[in-house]
Image (cartoon, coloured by chain):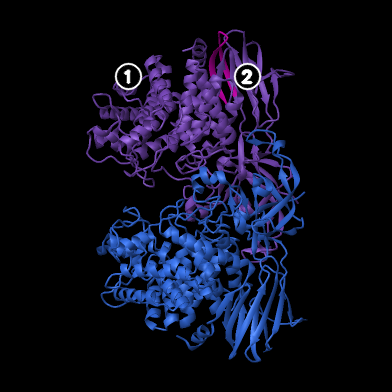
Chain colours: A purple, B blue
Amino acid sequence: MSKAAETVYKDNKQTVKIQDEFWGRYIRLVQDTVIPYQYEALHDRVPEAEPSHAIANFEIAAGRKSGEFKGWVFQDSDVAKWLEAVGYSLSIKPDPELERRADEIIDLVGEAQLEDGYLNTYFIINGLDKRWTNLQDCHELYCAGHFIEAAVAYYEATGKDKLLNIMRRNIDHIDSVFGPEEGKIKGYDGHQEIELALVKLYRLTGEEKFLRLASFFIDERGQEPNFLRQEWEQRGRVTHWSGKTDRMDPAYNQAHLPVREQSVAVGHSVRAVYMYTAMADLAAITGDEALREACKRLWSNMTEKQMYVTGGIGSTHHGEAFTFDYDLPNDTVYAETCASIGLIFFAKRMLEMIPDAGYADIMERALYNNVLGSMAQDGKHYFYVNPLEVWPQACSCDPGKHHVKSERQGWFGCACCPPNVARLLTSLNQYIYTVHGDTLYTNLYIGSELNVKLGGTEVAVSQQSSYPWEGKVSLQLDPAASGEFGLALRVPSWSEGIEIKINGEVLESAERQQGYVIIRRVWNAGDVIEAEIPMEAHRVYAHPLLRADAQKTAIQRGPLVYCLESADNGEPLSSVTLDETAAFSETFDESLLGGAVVVESKGFRVDQQGWNGGLYNRVKAPVNEVKIKAVPYYLWGNRGSGEMRVWIAEGKA
Amino acid sequence: MSKAAETVYKDNKQTVKIQDEFWGRYIRLVQDTVIPYQYEALHDRVPEAEPSHAIANFEIAAGRKSGEFKGWVFQDSDVAKWLEAVGYSLSIKPDPELERRADEIIDLVGEAQLEDGYLNTYFIINGLDKRWTNLQDCHELYCAGHFIEAAVAYYEATGKDKLLNIMRRNIDHIDSVFGPEEGKIKGYDGHQEIELALVKLYRLTGEEKFLRLASFFIDERGQEPNFLRQEWEQRGRVTHWSGKTDRMDPAYNQAHLPVREQSVAVGHSVRAVYMYTAMADLAAITGDEALREACKRLWSNMTEKQMYVTGGIGSTHHGEAFTFDYDLPNDTVYAETCASIGLIFFAKRMLEMIPDAGYADIMERALYNNVLGSMAQDGKHYFYVNPLEVWPQACSCDPGKHHVKSERQGWFGCACCPPNVARLLTSLNQYIYTVHGDTLYTNLYIGSELNVKLGGTEVAVSQQSSYPWEGKVSLQLDPAASGEFGLALRVPSWSEGIEIKINGEVLESAERQQGYVIIRRVWNAGDVIEAEIPMEAHRVYAHPLLRADAQKTAIQRGPLVYCLESADNGEPLSSVTLDETAAFSETFDESLLGGAVVVESKGFRVDQQGWNGGLYNRVKAPVNEVKIKAVPYYLWGNRGSGEMRVWIAEGKA
């Protein structure tokens, strides 16, 4: 580990508590509704959802009851993600009953674990002879990774180390199976996850062996001879999923090249961002330049050529994958919720390594749009796919769009997204600030309380924010003793500027670095920094090579991308154009789904009554001037099934 | 059979010879290149194409050699379609060597036929115990249908009845297996085709049993209990294709409702139009009103709500099927060549039953665009899928568009389209005229010689046409003796009118009926009718509910739909808008792929150099005025792989 990186890491330790009207509501929703609902779902007690069987699998593996394994081969991970979310939740707010339930599940997990440390209900139930024989498909290390993350979160929240010890034994077993040494498997999981989890465990414990194992998995990936290909040949070129012959494409698992040689985001998008997250973690900790450069290249490709304006990534449902540069269709889109969550993980690691507000811009974009929009206002319904253009009838009648839903669904057969949302929102406090040297970087404007050591001084920071509806932010600094240190305020890329006052006085000039205003001075207890970030609604255009958005505009206001819904603008939305030059009016509508700023403007609508007939005609239908109403994207689909569009055609009178 | 229908049918018998510069070239291409090339392909002697194995299957079935059946279960039909095309070709131009080759193949087919009349190489080679057990998937009656069509065409061209007799024996066998009688299968083929073929055989022979069998298959379809569902249950709910459990959707095979109750085009599009063709045949012959009304409803739904402007139908590659009204995406499109050929079959039958030029309009649209465009100028490369918008990189890198190709391919693994094009073009003479009562209807403006009996008089008709580049048409009538009868000239729906001269004198007024100008008078030998149909390039707009084409226009000139190619307009084509009001200039470009009228106009192109950076930006790139060049759609993709668009965004200066 480089000395510099180690310092960064240790200084980064913060205690942040969110006190925010906007996010507080979502976090409470997760605590009061999502976590209890998911607990029921894991126990197959949600009548309207497909049975998860995840707890039942553990009960069978533990010998408490008999039965068959059911669900996906990675079903265990749902239990882990729930436990992780519980950990975060308990660190926000104690809840003895919830803790008791979690402890019970941890007991169950412990009972299911084998003597040698192995822990995976699919293979414990179906036969251990097959364990570690199909890393490509079977998610064994992936599930272990999620349990490691859960163990860390649960330990940090409760101080209880039972799950931690279960996972220590499990990793000892994994360490005995995988590694560069003679007789061990020189391989890695088809679905990256354990790598970033092992880094978390290393950070908690400081034990090098966890870091070494994470590095092994990352470094081994994509080396020749290709492990996944060899394994595939060994099992007769068949896939676990159908038992039939399948083609092999290591790029799907980001194993087509050694990770340090990768430049383009390819393959399954969640796997990709989980891997990039671990790569950034390792680059920060070890100071590995080549790894850091690979992270920067992959970040650039992904966010500058393959990301939806909502922060969605992975444009095709075929393999839930990236396709290629500028291929971002709005209607056949995938943009899986988990992928944007992984993008946020990656952004956080990049921010920890490099103080560049560009990473926070993307983090904010993904968080406030793709991820926030994936959950219904009731916390019980989710989008897995987050489209930018929806025609409900096409979702049901056009097989190429069957994966797109116009209304959020209950717990899924493959329930990765809901628990991922839950664990992200309950750990959102970890995403607001970073520290570099003696400077505190404010990446997200979310009301929060923070205690942090800056330039040798303990500082209590209190942020208040009227986000996302207004750009007013204030930070009160309370250093234990007056002292010099830096405060960096992110100037969002969507903003035209920022006005800052310190203790009521306008800050006339300040250093600007990589998207932050950096204020360095001697701070005294009670100093108040007020920032006003203009948040007017504006148009967004896409790169000319992004063919799907040509001649179209999106509307954004602050961090929020807006959309048109047929509930406000009638059907079909394709008939609506936005006047190319019309101004926007912005009003807070208290009655709209808990209150939201709506954006209105002038546009045109094709007059269908004026169409001359037939499917095709020489004469086009006339247009009428209409008022256009846009609502935040994250609220779409909460008013029944209807059309929705983020990208709106622009027209002239 | 109703008396009226019988009369119509008999009067319809015409002898037409095409003498046309435009189509003559394509017909010669089929004769000189396509038929010989396909002969080689059927014999697995085309190095660059996947082996067909179709002739080899017959050789194995006939016991001439040993080996396994290879290819699709319906591979036999490729041989049949080739023989049918050869029949048509020989009726145009004798070719002893070609006839010898065809006779040899017919000998081989006869050798493969079983004693009981059964003829299908898949089951003869793989085991007769399975014959007639999976009508849903296995295409046995479909293949028989194609051989019936071949037998009729070959007999009509050569007078040789060997194949006809083979198929008589085959039908006797089929008749012993299928029918309403006790002990017979009350079923029908998963892929309609034999129905229309049996009608052809009935028309040739006048034998009622063929008509009865065709009616049985049509009438039985969609009755409850559902045959396809019962059969599926009996075979354990598995599909032939994978041997695995599959869902059952009788709508895919248009067997969800009795045919007379169907109103919406659903399911596999080729199956649909083949069935509608037979329905129209039967309605015309039997005078069945309910069947006729069903044909009219299905025609309307298909052509007024589910057809591309190029005459393509079946918008999804999932099952090569229709989706639902107004769902016509341009880039994920299917629009299979065979489906448009089937649409032409159906249109011909409707025209024979009902003198409405609307049917001819659609026939012309499908013929000059989707079908003609499917074949390369060399006759050796074909499109199976006929897209209206192509981005070549998406065809290779976006799995949702893998079925779309940016360049025509050689003979396919599933080679239905090329032989279907061949048989259509060599029989194109059958699509030009219809006769109702004593009136000759001119449906296509294709240079041709016709002998027909009108109002009791034998009339020789000679049509000359400058189509598709100019709208000048002349017809010379030479009745054996002066006599009164009607001549109906179609006024194309794309035209703004028609000017007609008779023997040099302008026809001031004439009866207009259902899209035709009807001229009834006493005609004398040497009478000349000249028609001038304005053929200026114009814009076409799509119905406001056709979301994919909103804010866009297509260009059409005469029967030809135009497109932009990046070869003329640069990439990306999404950056190009056509000026909303700009005029078109039209020039014949002799150097363009054999000569074609190109359409030019004024438009705008996004200046990519002026883009401010990033994937998304507040400021849009400036646009520059540019010249836009459109070429006929049927010629697209003949100048290397590039972008293509039929629907072009419209903009204002």
Give the answer, above or below, for where B591 lies relative to A492. below
Could you say which is closer to the camera, residue B368 or residue B213? B368
Q: Is residue A393 visible?
A: yes
Could you say which is closer to the camera, residue B201 or residue B271? B201
Which subunit holds the residue at mark 1? A
Left or right: residue B491 versus residue A409 is right
Does the magenta segment cover residue B32? no
Quadrant (top left, top right, bottom left, bottom right) of the N terminus of chain B: bottom left
Give the answer, above or below, for where B399 lies relative to B3. above
Which subunit holds the residue at mark 2? A
Does the magenta segment cover residue A454? yes
Left or right: residue B390 versus residue B112 is right
Left or right: residue B640 versus residue A621 is left
The residue that label 2 is drawn on is A488
Provide residue A252's location: percent of width, then percent of height: 44, 36
The segment highlighted magenta reads: A447-463
